[in-house]
Amino acid sequence: MEVRVYKASKILELWEDQQLKNAFPIGIGKEEQGHKFCEGDLRTPEGEYEICVKNPKSKYYLSLGLNYPNLKDAKLALDSRRITDE
């Protein structure tokens, strides 16, 4: 199963065996443009992430928690000195 999110059209698609199985309208962060930079920036991450939490009791119908930041995000933050390697 693959999940694809299109921020501009606010659509989440579910794909299986290279076929579109379903599509859903979604809500994203208030700052719709650009990749997530840090906690609290109101942006939605862009890239490849794993869904690690499913919350069916969310006030937003169903929220999905991602493994953000992933290794790529952490490396970018380290390289730009937003975090340390400690």
Image (cartoon, rainbow, N blue to C red):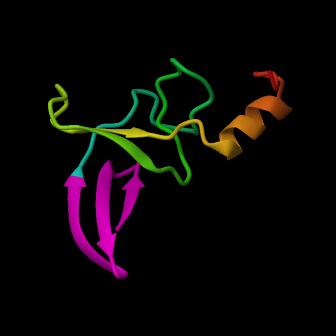
Q: Residue at x 15, y 30 (%)?
A: 57
Q: Position of residue 17 (x, y in %)?
A: 34, 82
Q: Position of residue 10 (x, y in %)?
A: 32, 48
Q: Is residue 18 above or below residue 81?
A: below
Q: Is residue 82 above or below residue 44?
A: above
Q: Is residue 80 above or below residue 6?
A: above
Q: Is residue 16 above or below residue 86?
A: below
Asked whether 37 or 73 is in front, the reply is: 73
Q: Position of residue 59 (x, y in %)?
A: 16, 25
Asked whether 69 or 41 is in front, the reply is: 69
As drawn, the residue found furthest toward the front would be 86
Q: Tell me: 24 left or right of 64.
A: left
Q: Quadrant of residue 37?
A: top right
Q: Which stretch did the figure color magenta?
A: 1-24
Q: Position of residue 5 (x, y in %)?
A: 39, 54
Q: Tell me: 43 left or right of 2.
A: right
Q: Residue at x 82, y 26 (%)?
A: 85
Question: In the rendered picture of this protein, how many numbered marks are placed on residues?
Answer: 0
Q: Residue at x 84, y 34 (%)?
A: 79
Quarter of the figure with the C terminus? top right
